[in-house]
Image: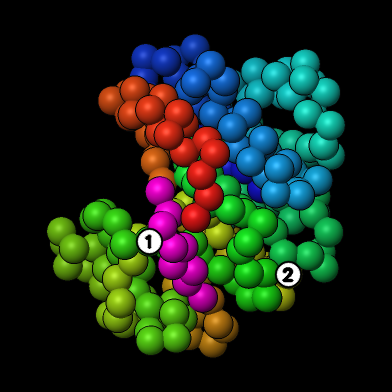
Amino acid sequence: MIFAAGLGTRLKPLTDTMPKALVRVGGQPLLWHVIQKLKASGYERLVVNVHHFAEQIVDYLKANDNFGLDIRISDETDGLLETGGGIKKALPLFDSSEPILIHNVDILSNLDLSALPTEAPLLVVSQRKTKRYLQFDDDMRLIGWKNIETCEVKGREGRPLAFSGIHMFHPFLAPLLENWPDRFPIMDFYLKVCADHVIRGFDAPHLQLLDVGKLDTLEQAEVFMETNSHNKP
């Protein structure tokens, strides 16, 4: 699943006329880069959630014949559902027996998606500077979260690692979503259920990652694509 419904407010004024997913890097939209990475990794069915300028994304996919893939749209034009609500709404579009790889549309990386373990729910993380860190025990099991600026802690403290925006959602978690509201962050869900269910972190070796969230990162993204397009950890 590609999260592409966001407003992209940090990329204004570009996103005043287009969705963040269609902002170009290296001559191609961000959405193109993620689709090609997933396709090269063997993924055949993709779900893209849409909200901001949703019709532009739908038209782009149609114009490109869905890149030869089974691409389905999860329509959030009536209201943004955040990451957790987005997954909950999209579940009927997936094979209920298979894990779901979730990928933010504005994340570029050298991560080999085909090498990710699929046995358990998984959060791709790295030792990267950020304001909010996920916390893991010695077995890389999720145990908490901490905002280092406000010192707010959820759960317990442990090994701090930065979340990448890439994660693996497992079918056995789906029934646990039923009592959650239509709109909520998926990380709140993970932090709630990790006490009773194993949610693992995957500290990708040699991970290079760029969050293309602001205008000043677009130039960095151009360089990133040039230097990482043929490299995998």
Magenta-drawn segment: 200-208
Residue under the image location 53 percent in, 16 percent down: 27
**Which callout, 2 or 1, points at the residue further toward the start of the chain?**
1
Whole-Å distance between the Cαs marked 2 and 1? 25 Å
Q: Is residue 192 visible?
A: no
Residue under the image location 44 percent in, 80 percent down: 140
Tell me the kind of residue under disc 2.
Answer: Pro
User: Where does the image place residue 91, in percent across and percent down from the top left?
Assistant: 74, 56
SS at mark 1 in the image: strand
209 up-or-down from 191: above or below? above
Residue under the image location 51 percent in, 75 percent down: 200
Task: Between residue 128 and residue 207, name the one nearer to us.
Answer: 207
15 up-or-down from 6: above or below? above
Task: Between residue 19 and residue 61, name the one nearer to us.
Answer: 61
User: Where does the image place residue 15, in percent across and percent down from the top left?
Assistant: 45, 19
In magenta segment, residue 206? yes
Residue 126 is labelled as 1
